[in-house]
Image: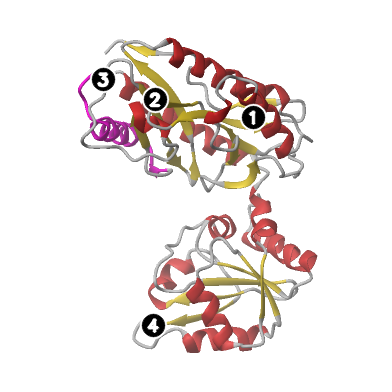
Amino acid sequence: MKNNLSDRLAEYATVAADLGVDAVALVPGPNFIRAVIHPFMSHERPFVLVVPATGMPAALVPNLELRSWDLVGFDGAVFDWRDQDGYEAAFGALLDHLQIKTLAVEGQVMRVFVHHALLRAQPDLQVMDAEREISALRMIKTPSDIEALKAAIAISERALERTLATVRLGQTEKEIEQTLIQALFAEGAEDQSFHPIVAAGDGSARPHAKARADYAVKAGDALLLDFGARKNGFAADITRTVFLGHATDEGQAVHDTVLRANLKGFEVTKAGVTAHQIDDAVTGVLEASPYADRIRTKTGHGLGRDVHEAPYIMRGNHMVLPAGTVYTNEPGLYEIDNFGVRIEDDVLITQDGCTSLTQFPKELTVLKC
């Protein structure tokens, strides 16, 4: 990533030119933060940065954010508005200034009311979804990005070690979740990547389960923890599944199958591979097992400023993955009303192969609790 604001904005101008549109618009979120470095909230007040293919960028800024916006060092035109007056006139002034006909936006981030405000200000404006092209600038991680990810992952792994050391039979999922959250911040997290998934027993069979206050963990349970720390703007995303007291033969076999699938992902990953090829290899291990009917998810997703970002590691996605891409390798098997196992690592693609940014043990672990 470029160190200079004008150079970073020039990258978005290039995206607009490559797409054949007049400008790209960014709203608060990961791409916005990448561009201006400073974080701004996404709330009821519209905040839009527009970067033309040629010419100076412009911004629509809530008045109460003006002093914070000064820290960005932005040289373009700024159109501010106050709550008492509303934002309609500011949108009109912004578009009158830009004189554009076509605009590419982040389809997964821009909210409907902002889109509608743009069209009320200029009904003939043609708006297109360029989420893929805009977000693609974040896909190849810089050395500083990688260091931030490593820091977030290291915090997460220390928090996991602390949490597992405290697990006792009879605790509720919610109690274990609270211990994990406290450990993340104690170890230096600036925030959580997302609200943790802490699920035991039949709860572990729900890939996105919520911790229950009324479920006490018991001997033989699978305990799945999916979580991550956020540090320096970057998010970790780790999952480990352990067993409490003992693991059944079925539990050991399922865990072994998921681990083999996870390792297969590392085996096939290198620069130039496609997302389809990784998922096909990983899912193929699961499909060849006696537990193929327990497959419920793709192999993984990109990781960086967002927890879920490009590339999405799934069959049918033939995007070629360059060196510098980071993705999650997280195969899992889930049998509803029984249990689930997921193992998730954060993987950096290199020219000759890949590196696991996660180091926490993933072999079968039985907690003596």
Secondary element at image label 1: helix
What kind of residue is marked 2? Arg
Give how far apart the Cα atoms at labels 3 and 1 are: 31 Å
Q: From the image, tell me which residue sits under label 4.
A: 82
What kind of residue is marked 3? Lys
Q: Which mark is residue 19?
A: none
Earlier along the polypeptide chain: callout 3 or callout 2? 2
Please provide the residue range marked out in magenta. 166-192
What kind of residue is marked 4? Arg
Q: From the image, tell me which residue sits under label 3.
A: 218
128 or 26, which lies in front?
128
For the C terminus, the image quarter is top left
The crowd level at tag 2 (other Cα within 10 Å; few <14, some 14-19, many 20+) is: some
Q: Is residue 172 magenta?
A: yes
Q: Is residue 118 left or right of residue 99?
A: left
Earlier along the polypeptide chain: callout 2 or callout 4? 4
Earlier along the polypeptide chain: callout 3 or callout 4? 4
**What residue is at 48 percent from the left and 17 percent from the top?**
361
